[in-house]
Amino acid sequence: MKVLVAYATRHGSTAGIAERIAGRLVNDGVPAEALPVEKVRDVSPYDAVVLGSAAYMGRWLRDAGAFAKRQREALQSRQIWLFSSGPLGRDLVDKDGKNVLVNSRPKEFGELQSQLKPKDTRVFFGAWDPSSPAVGIGERLMRLAPVSTGALPSGDFRDWDAIDAWADDIAATLKGSPRTT
């Protein structure tokens, strides 16, 4: 049993989540590796796939969607899990009383759920460092706009305990036994 944790990332936060999931799977006794989607040409060496992407404006990055489309037939014959990262901050409920992680589900999840039948989908908080060289001029300018005040808080908001627990659940499913911790 070998697992591919494929991901699309813009600033590295999603790569960190994917690497953490792969590492946790390995620690749980399930061989796994994390690779950016653009480096994966063939999923046939893998028995299962965890596919994730950063989400912006309610959508996955284009590379992740293209990967899912290109690999659809192969992914349909494997156990698959989907994740997304992106919401920033620590509040689980927004100003309207809605669950931030539920409302941050990327639009692609609906279509991918019907096509790929994933075992589970998750949305995780992300991280954003406006001083990173990977942050483009457009994002820097958007952050300065009055309308976006507070919309792009900087910091690392990834919930490593939730990510680890999800990876442990994946490992337990792949090993054929429910997680007991």
Image (spheres, rainbow, N blue to C red):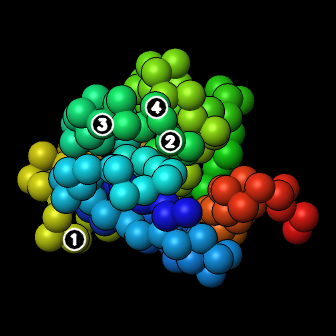
Q: Which of disc 1 and disc 4 is earlier in sequence?
A: 4
- Amino acid type shown at disc 3: Gln
Q: Residue at x 46, y 31 (%)?
A: 76
Disc 2 to disc 1, C-alpha distance: 36 Å
Which residue was labeled with disc 3? 71
Q: Nearer the viewer, mark 1 or mark 3?
A: 3
Q: Quadrant of the C terminus?
A: bottom right
Residue 132's tag is: 1
Q: Which of disc 3 and disc 1 is earlier in sequence?
A: 3
Q: Secondary structure at mark 1?
A: loop
**Label 4–label 1 contact, CB within 8 A:** no
Q: Residue at x 42, y 48 (%)?
A: 52
Relative to 61, 51 lies left or right: right
Disc 2 to disc 3, C-alpha distance: 11 Å
Which residue was labeled with disc 4? 76
Q: Which of disc 1 and disc 2 is earlier in sequence?
A: 2
- Amino acid type shown at disc 1: Ser
Q: Which of disc 4 and disc 3 is earlier in sequence?
A: 3
Relative to 52, 167 lies left or right: right
Disc 2 to disc 4, C-alpha distance: 6 Å
Q: Residue at x 57, y 35 (%)?
A: 118
Disc 4 to disc 1, C-alpha distance: 37 Å
Which residue was labeled with disc 2? 78
